[in-house]
Amino acid sequence: MLNRLRLVIVFFILAYITLTVRLFYWQVVKGKTLSIQARGQYEAGETINAQRGDIFDTKGGWLAASGEAYIVYASIPDLELPKKKIAEDLALFFVEDSSNKGELLAEIDRIYSLINREGAIWVPLKQKVDPSVKEKIEELSLAGIGFDLQEKRVYPESSSSAHLLGFVGKDESGNDTGYFGLEGYWDLALSGKPGFLNREQDAQGLPILLGLTNEVTAIEGASLITNIDKGIQLNIEDRLKEGIEKYGAKGGVVIVLQPKTGKLMALSAYPSYDPSSYWKYSNEFFINPAISLSFEPGSVFKVLVMASALDAEVLKPDTECDICAGAVRIDKYTIETWNQVYHPDATMTEVIVNSDNVGMVYVSQKLGADKLYDYLSAFGIGEKSGIDLQGESSPKLREKGTWSVVDLATAGFGQGIAVTPIQLTRAVAAIANHGKLVAPKVVGKIKVNEWEEDIKTEEVRRVISEKAASQITQMMVEAARNGEAKWTHLQGFKVAGKTGTAQIPIAGHYDAEKTIASFIGFAPYDDPEFVMLVTLQEPQTSQWASETAAPLWYSIARDLFVRFGIQPEK
């Protein structure tokens, strides 16, 4: 009897321990998970999307905005017509070209497979549908086909400013996300913060009328007021397209920068794309050549090397070149002038005017590799400019102490060294800004409702003295008036500029027939309103910048003179 009692007691003790352990497991270990699962059975959650901020030009004109669009969906239990018939009716509105039978049939199959899926109840069929298309679908009175309001990104100028703006696509979770340009760089600010609606539901998933509702309000995204002047932007877009067609170039870039502040007033690059229909383009179209692709600058680079030598006081504007009587031998290479014309005892000003490669070898040798490296680094060569556009990259400057005599010589005339267009523009802007380097900025102000904050431009550092900046500016004035592009010069206007014709390196050598033509300059040279770079990739009518990039630069500058009220000298 006693043994039986003991067994009963042991049984109850073990049962109690087991029950306690199980309760601990379900309440403590799995409690949080079960609580979430239980809430999921009686609560329904819904994300409230935040409205994306707009992007404006400097005068308040729209560059990008959030427009009205719709999701077209099917409520499967409410469909009355045959599913195949519904797919055929809707496909006509979802394809771009309804006369393309292959495209139309593929769309019919896509829609049918969605609404015919086993167990489907609510199925989204098409995103970002325009209001005009919605109205046409509504006229069909298709039972079970409905619409939910959503946001659609609108770019009023289509492909204009595409490389500045980027586009809004989807991330891996299906959320709207900015890519490239301003949309990518400022995505966090533009996106805002989504809200959430949480409400109780019954066993059938229907909202309980008097149930608890918890709503977290969405915070709309910030709007950007940029430094872009839409008038200038549209003008350079048109001029660049005309120039590419006229000179048979493969591509091109135009950048217009305010040298005193670093404000980017306009940027255009070709080829371009339409950000409203980004999915139609392959990825290479999204690369902004102005900030992401590098090139050997050629003779436009001479002004940076000469400015460095003037600041280091290793020479003066009237210093005479004692090796300029003919071609010069550096190691196993012979360096000639671009036209095989030589200028014995040429002054440094004449070296710039004549775009003399041999003269620039003399300048770089006077400066020395280490000093040249330091000056180029100070000009921002080899570092990102810091422009507020997604996708900027920077080629590396050859490490200090590793430069050969050939590297030093060829760097003097912009060969064997790489820059991006924005780096080059920023560096020459430092000359126009009396020797001070600034960071280029696209956005001037961030605004949310009544709150706004100015984006201050930054002076990064002084690169050269005011004296050296004035000296190289005068050399560039002489180059614009009397250099190889003098025939394009606008008489009476105060322009400082320099041409560049760079051969393109291919498989370890330079192709004399393939060039990048460029012209960079600023005006008025004594109080600059703008610095502008024009580059053309592989122009076919002429390989020389003086016959392609320079006339294109002046055709744009003529319009800028009018816009800024710049008058010719009397």
Image (spheres, rainbow, N blue to C red):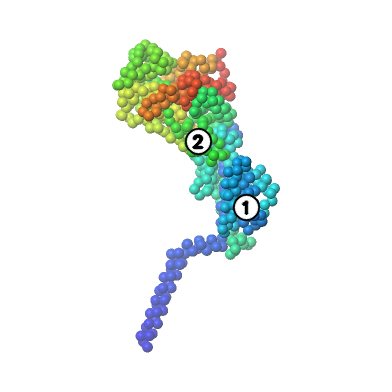
SS class, disc 2: helix
Q: Is residue 75 above or below residue 284?
A: below
Expressed as whole percent of the image width and height from the top left, the position of residue 1 reads 37, 88
> Seen in the image, is 518 located left or right of residue 373?
right
| Residue at (57, 49) in percent of width and height | 110
Task: Indicate which label's residue lies in the foreground, 2 or 1.
Answer: 1
**Which residue has dot 1 on it?**
84
* Nearer-the-camera pick, 516 or 49: 516
Q: Is 193 placed above or below 543 here?
A: below
Left or right, 384 with reference to 105: left
**How would you rate the neighbour count of disc 1 (Cα within 10 Å): few for under 14, some for 14-19, many for 20 or more?**
some
Q: Foreground residue, 441 or 382?
A: 382
Residue at position x 31%, y 23% from top? Answer: 405
Q: Residue at x 46, y 23 (%)?
A: 517
Where does the image place residue 433, in percent across and percent down from the top left?
A: 47, 25
Quarter in which the C terminus is drawn: top right
Q: Which residue is mark 2?
A: 285
Q: Tell me the CA gap for discs 2 and 1.
A: 38 Å
Q: Position of residue 458 (x, y in %)?
A: 47, 32
Looking at the image, is 96 positioned above or below residue 404? Answer: below
Identify the amino acid type marked 2.
Phe
